[in-house]
Amino acid sequence: MTTTSFITQRSMTRRRIVRAALAAGAAVPLAAIASPAWAAPGAAPVPERLTLPVPTGPYPVGTAQLHLADRSRPDDIAGPGHFRELMATVWYPARNVERYPVAPWMPAGALQAFLADVGFSDLVPLAPLTVGHVGAPVRRSGPRLPVVVFSHGAHSHQGDHTLMVQELASHGYAAVTVAHQYDTYTEFPDGRVAVPLDDRKAPTLPGDFAADLRFVLDCVEQLAAGCNPDIAQRELPTGLLGSLDPRRMGAFGWSKGGTATACATLADERIRAGLSLDGPMQMNPPLAGDLDRPFMMMSAEFTRATDPEAAAFWTHLRGWRLNIQAQGGAHISYGDNEALFPQVAKLLGWSEQQLQDVIGTLDPDQAVKIQQAYPLAFFDAHLRHRQGHLLDGPSPAFPAVTFLP
């Protein structure tokens, strides 16, 4: 099979996007911004750390990591005797969270590697915390939890859409994020830190991401059956075994992960509903077959009007389908960037134009609310059969959201 990279001249990896941010407004040492010249007299001091929006759901959130190996897929890069190795994180509604610590946005080693690679090393001490309490017991008051699996973008990391993941967990979902080996920043239990490899030396295609997602579905089924898929059989949170519902599983992803979500949904009927966040839909091998299960596209830059691949994918959707677009949004507008970059811009003294060059003209507060509302409404409709009205058409609460015919 041809291993042409899916990245086009219009597509940007997470690394390139953040480097573009540096071009918009150069990073400066934290020592220099402790008393920034641009701050007005009496201005608030530099925050102890960046923050993510609090989820809107009624439940506190728990989280746990899984170290996985897909023994059906030999790892030629690691060498003989090695198999595809992945880190995954489960987010879920929790109870009795008070004595459990909250998880960081990224593991320390992966965070340092990521921010160093994009030139933001001075922001390491300000990295946000999540609301996920590590190892907290699972909240179960009724049926098993519906499950959604998440696929990150090229050269990104599994925490990049924590905002959405926490939101879903706070409303009663189990959300499983996966770190796609060789195209991500992640940290393994033995302390190894993995970083993205050069696409020319170790090309990782959307189909590889899709295979990871399908393997994670296998692991969800193991958890549902009471089996621990972790390589070292590390202790899991109380109540996690047997709490997931393998009959109600969905998938979503951003950029390359959005394309991978489409590939996985086409290939695996266990995925009852799929959501792409500005996925380029540049598939290799080419798309084949139609999809009769629900699929939603949240577009920003990769629209059907401008990208033949996205338009072609749309024609293969034979079931429930919806395509919305957030006007003024950039490729990175669906993700934690909309919450974090405005804070970074304030710290570094960027102008409003410099910030918009990175995240677009969509109001950041509106962008956050869109991320919280629309994926939840989609999965509620198709995994829980809770029919609201948000997906019926334009809403005055979200004036930037356009429904594309």
Image: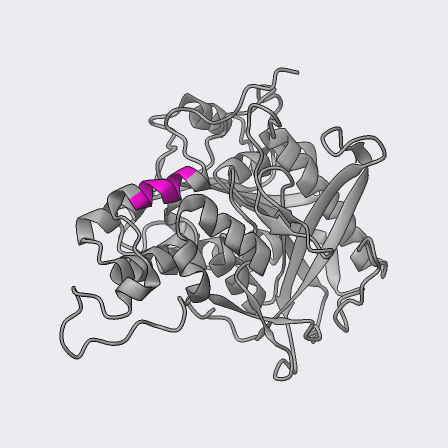
- Disc tally is 0
Q: Is residue 130 visible?
A: yes
Q: Position of residue 312 (x, y in %)?
A: 47, 23
Q: Residue 91, position in %: x, y?
A: 62, 63
Looking at the picture, tell me which residue is in the foreground, 245 or 382.
245
Determine whether, in the image, residue 149 is placed left or right of residue 74.
left
Q: Is residue 5 above or below residue 378?
A: above
- Viewer-side residue, 307 vs 273: 307
Vertical placement of residue 333 versus 287, above or below: below
Which residue lies at the image location 68% right of the left edge and 50% below the top edge?
Answer: 192
Viewer-proximal residue among 371 and 198: 198
On screen, residue 239 above or below 284: below
**Which residue is nearer to you in this view: 402 or 42?**
42
**Does residue 328 appear in the picture of this structure?**
no
Helix, strand or loop: magenta stretch: helix
- Find the magenta span and give its range: 16-22
* Quarter-of-image position of residue 339: bottom left
Outermost top residue: 2
Residue 80 image point, x, y percent: 83, 30
Q: Where's residue 127, x and y in %?
A: 45, 63
